[in-house]
Image: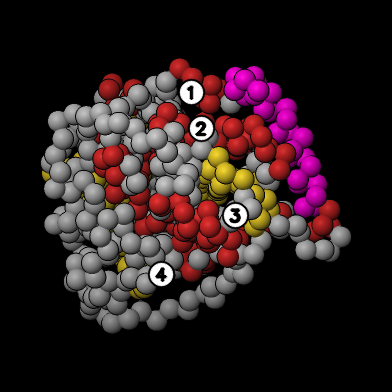
Amino acid sequence: MDRRAFLKTAAAAGTFVLATSQSGFAQAVSAGAKPAKVRLACVGIGNRGAEVLKAFSDTGEAEIVALCDTDIGAPHTVASLKAHPAATQFRDFRRMFDRMAKDIDAVCVCTPDFSHFPIVMLAMSLGKPVYVEKPMGHSFRQMELMMAAEKRYKVATQMGNQGHSEANYFQFKAWTEAGIIRNVTRITAFMNNPRRWHGKKFDSFLPGMPVPASLDYDTWLATARQLEYNVGYMNGDWRSWYELGNGALGDWGAHIFDTAHEFLELGLPVEVDPVKIEGHSPWIFPQASTLVFKFPARGTKPALELTWYDGQQNLPPLPGNFGTAVVDPNIPPPSKGSIDTQRTPPGKVIYGEGLTFKGGSHATTLQILADPKGGAPALSLPVVPKTTSNHFLNFLRACQGTEKCRSPFSVAGPLCQAMAIGILAQRVNAPLRFDPVSRRITNHALANEMLAGVPPRREWEQFYRL
């Protein structure tokens, strides 16, 4: 089928597929039987994608029916292919849906940041629940369209900040509901480990190189501009570039202050000030940055200032009684190097009314810092409920109709959009004022235009209309 014709008929076909798969799950639940396994298609199966694929497979609730990667068969995809030899293989996600839409219940997307959007939009338009790695999209506009599509197509969605289904999530929720965390006015968040772009400098995009025969490079580019192939963009190195990645903030913010953003109802900032930018470049992310996000008062909650620190030497100011850092031994290492426990591992300090809390990233729970003058406070802490499902099983159960996703686009979208505004402040190296009502940056015309992201190449425009 012609791809344009396929896209025109996708919504109608997807309605049937969704109704069929949901009714099958619903019938099993209502009859008291265990729901059928979710037939899962995985797009992006190497590197982080291989880890996510294994996590889904390990739940025992997913049947891997399709594997898709633009460089399928390359060394970084071999382990996934060997683990699931019965899955049908594709290089192009559009051909996968064209051939197998009726055989797929849900989709997992672990491609580079800039290519999440078209895969997710097509999947949702076909009525498919979607799990997508963080950040959920690349530009503010993409995230806006993804949230709208979630409402329109009424499918389960989950962003892959896996700590949002573990101990930190349930603790933060219980402590805010009990008033232990209250009237927060300041948060310090930090990620000071090495990044791929540290120590590098570029005056343009990279020069062209021959495209490997195994790679479908045009599909890899997706909605990005027509960059010439260079190995310096591949296998995680795309993270360095503004037009392809989301930097340290977009990569780690969703693991560090995601629970604060949700349960303190931060929404979108009204101002982001890049008070420190080291090694500013129009091409790649800075060597270090300090960004101050200003969130307005929300109902009875006071205005809040969140300060973000990245860069190996750009260490945050910490309370004198901070002590040792909070480190979750189960979190994956950064995209380059490892977490250095001798410096400050990724984490946060939350300043609330009467109490200060320290925390790490992902699933690490908060600790209450003792008052230097009065010792540890006497508190009656609420019981924190435990869950029977992790982030991956939570998504599969949402597909089956037995749970709700904990990081749906309606929750993850505003978090990622707040970070997207911060990334624009890094990129233009100027304070930005944002109007949450008009969804516009009001003091910087170029940054306001950049909210829309890179104009897609012509054949990819159709994904913005799904």
Dot 4, crowdedness within 10 Å: few (<14), some or many (≥20)? few
- Label 1 close to label 4 by CB (< 8 Å): no
The amino acid sitting under disc 1 is Trp
- Label 2 close to label 4 by CB (< 8 Å): no
Counting from the top left corner in percent of width and height, residue 365 is at 41, 70
Given residues 161 and 91, the one toward you in this image is 91
**Which quadrant: the C terminus?**
top right
Q: Which residue is disc 1 drawn over? A: 460
The residue at 25%/75% (across/down) is 324
The answer to whether residue 80 is left or right of residue 310 is right
Dot 3, crowdedness within 10 Å: few (<14), some or many (≥20)? few
Q: Which residue is disc 4 drawn over? A: 330
Q: Was residue 10 drawn as part of the magenta stretch in this picture? A: yes
Q: Which of marks 3 and 1 is in front?
A: 3
Q: Nearer the viewer, mark 1 or mark 4?
A: 1
**347 w.r.t. 72: above or below:** below
The residue at 57%/72% (across/down) is 386
Which one is earlier in the sequence, the residue at label 1 or at label 2? 2
Residue, far right = 31
Q: Which residue is disc 2 drawn over? A: 118
Q: Nearer the viewer, mark 2 or mark 3?
A: 3
The amino acid sitting under disc 3 is Pro
Residue 99: quadrant of the picture: top right
Q: What stretch is highlighted in magenta?
A: 1-26
Measured Cα–Cα span from mark 2 to mark 4: 31 Å
Q: Was residue 22 drawn as part of the magenta stretch in this picture? A: yes
Counting from the top left corner in percent of width and height, residue 392 is at 56, 58
Q: Nearer the viewer, mark 3 or mark 4?
A: 3
Which one is earlier in the sequence, the residue at label 2 or at label 3? 3
Secondary-structure class at tag 1? helix
